[in-house]
Image (tube, rainbow, N blue to C red):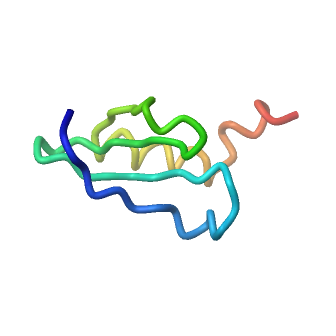
Amino acid sequence: MAVHSWQKSSYSGDAANCIYLAAAPDGTIKIRESDDPDVIVTTTPDKLRAFIRGVKAGEFDHLTD
């Protein structure tokens, strides 16, 4: 298993349920959550960027109703 330099989201503060991101040598982005750090999602910078834009635009708000 590769060793990654994980960075915690600045929105997490000192609370639980923190999101961590790491840039992998192959150019992908790794994402994990503090409650289950062995589960790692891999994506590309373009896909992550599109997801973040969608969240900011409210495209997923219906999932929290």
Q: Which residue corresponds to the image point at 40% horizontal and 33% vertical from the top-left?
A: 40
Q: Position of residue 48 (x, y in %)?
A: 40, 44
Location of residue 13 in the rendering, given as x and y in whole percent from the top left corner: 63, 70
Q: Front-most of 19 and 56?
A: 19
Image location (x, y in percent) of residue 52: 51, 50
Which residue corresponds to the image point at 62% horizontal and 63% vertical from the top-left? 12
Residue 60's place in the image compared with 7, above or below, is above
* Residue at (36, 39) in percent of width and height: 47
Task: Classify residue 44 as left or right of residue 50.
Answer: left
Measured as percent of width and height from the top left, residue 57 is found at: 63, 50
- Pick the residue in front: 58 or 39: 39
In the orientation shown, which residue stands out farthest toward the right?
65
The answer to whether residue 41 is left or right of residue 65 is left
Is 53 displayed left or right of 28 in the figure?
right
User: Which residue corresponds to the image point at 40% horizontal and 49% vertical from the top-left?
Assistant: 49
Q: Nearer the viewer, residue 36 or 12?
A: 36
Image height check: is 62 above or below 46? above
Please identify the residue farthest to the left as the structure is shown: 26
Q: Quadrant of the N terminus?
A: top left
- Looking at the image, how many numbered discs can be counted on the residues? 0
In the displayed structure, does residue 30 sit left or right of residue 16?
A: left
Q: Quadrant of residue 39?
A: top left
Q: Which part of the image, by quadrant, shows the C terminus?
A: top right
